[in-house]
Amino acid sequence: MNISEKIADIRRQPENIRLRYVWGCVAISMFFIVLIWVLSLTSLFQKNSNIDDKDSVTDLKNQLQNINKQAPSLKDFSQTPLTVESEGVQTSTDSEFEYPVIPNQEEIPQSASYSN
């Protein structure tokens, strides 16, 4: 029996039997997911136990020094003038959107909150 015949056979079963198949598949899937998760956790803890604490501290210090060299300082930010254009805000109102006019269609009245 191939997989398509098995699926057709399950579809012909009553609902309580189909639910058993569903929960069985869920349980099997979750078993594999939990198994992979546990294996990854054990490998993570094994790697952490092999690392020397002094090496990890020096690596962390080196990474922080590299970040400090690459990151801009507050002086750089204070010397850069802030402009509205650089923030992506449009200040002009002359380019307001105009809705297209469809011929032979009456205009839909707008409430006062939407009009100028």
Image (cartoon, rainbow, N blue to C red):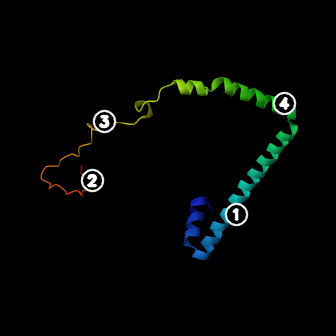
Q: Nearer the viewer, mark 3 or mark 4?
A: 3
- Mark 2 vs mark 4, CA separation in Å: 64 Å
Q: Indicate whether 40 appears above or below 57.
A: below
Residue drawn at point x = 85 percent, y = 42 percent? 46
Depth order, front residue of 82/62? 82
Q: Nearer the viewer, mark 1 or mark 2?
A: 2
The answer for how far apart the CA atoms under marks 1 and 4 are is 43 Å
The three-letter amino acid code for the residue at tag 1 is Ala
Q: Image quarter for residue 26?
A: bottom right
Task: Report whether 106 appears left or right of 40.
Answer: left
Q: Which residue is mark 2?
A: 114
Q: Nearer the viewer, residue 92 or 2?
A: 92
Marks 1 and 2 sit apart, C-alpha to C-alpha, by 55 Å
Counting residues from the start of the chain, the first of labels 1 and 4 encountered is 1
For numbered disc 2, what is the local secondary structure? loop
Residue wearing tag 3: 92
Give the structural element (helix, strand or loop) at label 3: loop
**Mark 3 or mark 4, earlier in chain:** 4
Looking at the image, is mark 3 or mark 2 earlier in the sequence?
A: 3
Q: Earlier in the sequence, mark 2 or mark 4?
A: 4
Q: Residue 10 falls in which quadrant of the image?
A: bottom right
* Residue 55, disc: 4
Task: Report crowding for label 4: few under 14, some 14 to 19, many 20 or more residues within 10 A (C-alpha).
Answer: few
Residue holding disc 1: 27
Seen at 70% across and 63% down, the residue is 27
Q: Earlier in the sequence, mark 1 or mark 2?
A: 1
Q: CA distance from mark 3 to mark 2?
A: 19 Å
Instruction: Check disc 1 and report its element: helix, strand or loop.
Output: helix
